[in-house]
Image (cartoon, rainbow, N blue to C red):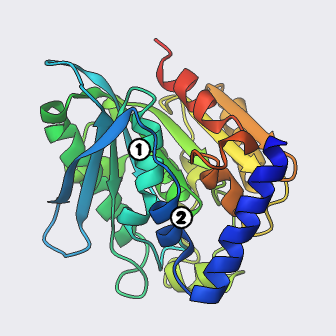
């Protein structure tokens, strides 16, 4: 019965988007209930001079005075050319309801910037968080970088190729773990139109591939992917997991039959959470000692 209701709701959701022409995620945030155990505690905070260099912060309701909760910096996807942090409030609220302080950051997009400038923006947002999040109840010494799709690539590259964090003034030793949801980690940037646009001028640059930076200092990694994903193929997650295992680094992988590219991030929402226990896996990951 639950599945039937969920299927009808999702069908109506897709139909209404088609009729109105509105943004799927914008509509999603407007009609889907948020997690009640969390709230937005800060908005439109600048971490740089560009209008796109802003972030929002989410935290559990009634956070205790002097609390030091795990901190998650979440980067959204959109092929490095689209995206808006306000459309991921459902993700920020869901993750903070786990008992974490969550930062959702915008960053400059293609064609205004190319690789690695969007990575540098993510590094700057992480550095701001590391320096300031204790004012919001977050622990700057226990931070997790997370993302979906292109945002998962950004999060994993930041955590593996630590030069960007160091350049931004962030200490990579404070990154407790990396969380990738349906990310492209092993690809030829010349093969796809999206990556040709984002990585123009860097086709032969080995720094493009996160796999090239897996080493003994890599923090624990948690990876998710839908087996029915045709946008970013599951082989990306498998390739990264193999590289981590060969380097004897802690890695957990979760593959979900029938789930598409969008399904994995929408599974964070209250409406579609039954699709996959991704939130529960993240909760267990960030609560490990």
Res 279 visible: yes
How packed is label 1: few (under 14 Cα within 10 Å), some, or many (20 or more)? many
Q: Residue shown at 23%/43% (left/top)? A: 129
Note whether 68 is above or below 129 in the view shown.
above
Pick whichever, 108 or 35, lies toward us: 35
The crowd level at tag 2 (other Cα within 10 Å; few <14, some 14-19, many 20+) is many
Q: Residue furthest top?
A: 289
- Of the residues under marks 2 and 1, which one precedes in the sequence? 2
> Residue 155 vs residue 113: left or right?
right
Q: Quadrant of residue 186?
A: bottom right
Q: Which mark is residue 28?
A: 2
Name the foreground residue: 158 vs 283: 283
> Would residue 146 appear left or right of 53 to someone viewing this image?
right
Q: Quadrant of residue 21?
A: bottom right
> Which of pointers 2 and 1 indicates the residue nearer the eye?
2
Badge 2 element: helix
Residue sitting at x 24%, y 25%: 63
Which residue sits at x=37%, y=63%? 85
For the residues marked 2 and 1, what is the alpha-carbon distance in whole angstroms?
13 Å
In this image, 96 relative to 204: left or right?
left
For the N terminus, the image quarter is top right
Residue 288: assigned label = none
- Residue that mark 1 sits on: 93
Residue 281 x %, y % = 62, 29
């Amino acid at each position: 019965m639950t599945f039937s209701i969920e299927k009808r709701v999702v069908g109506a959701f897709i139909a209404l988007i088609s009729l109105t022409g509105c943004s799927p995620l914008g509509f999603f945030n407007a009609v889907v209930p948020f997690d009640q155990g969390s709230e937005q505690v800060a908005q439109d905070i600048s971490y740089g001079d560009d209008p796109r260099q802003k972030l929002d912060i989410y935290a559990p309701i009634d956070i205790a005075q002097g609390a030091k909760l795990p901190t998650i910096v979440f980067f959204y996807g959109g092929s490095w050319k689209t995206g808006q942090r306000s459309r991921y409030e459902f993700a920020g609220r869901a993750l903070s309801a786990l008992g974490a302080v969550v930062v959702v950051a915008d960053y400059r997009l293609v064609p205004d910037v190319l690789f690695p400038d969007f990575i540098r923006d993510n590094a700057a947002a992480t550095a701001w968080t590391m320096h300031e999040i204790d004012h919001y109840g977050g622990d700057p010494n226990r931070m997790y970088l997370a993302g979906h799709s292109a945002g998962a690539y950004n999060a994993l590259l930041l955590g593996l190729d630590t030069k960007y964090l160091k350049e931004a003034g962030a200490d990579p030793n404070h990154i407790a773990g990396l969380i990738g949801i349906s990310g492209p980690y092993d690809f030829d940037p010349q093969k796809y139109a999206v990556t040709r646009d984002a990585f123009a001028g860097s086709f032969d640059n080995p720094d493009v591939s996160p796999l090239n930076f897996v080493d003994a200092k890599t923090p624990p990694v948690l990876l998710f992917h839908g087996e029915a994903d045709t946008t970013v193929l599951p082989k990306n997650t498998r390739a990264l997991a193999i590289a981590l295992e060969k380097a004897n680094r802690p890695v957990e992988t979760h593959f979900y039959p029938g789930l598409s590219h969008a399904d994995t991030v929408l599974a964070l929402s209250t409406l579609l959470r039954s699709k996959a226990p991704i939130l529960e896996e993240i909760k267990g990951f960030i609560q490990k000692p």
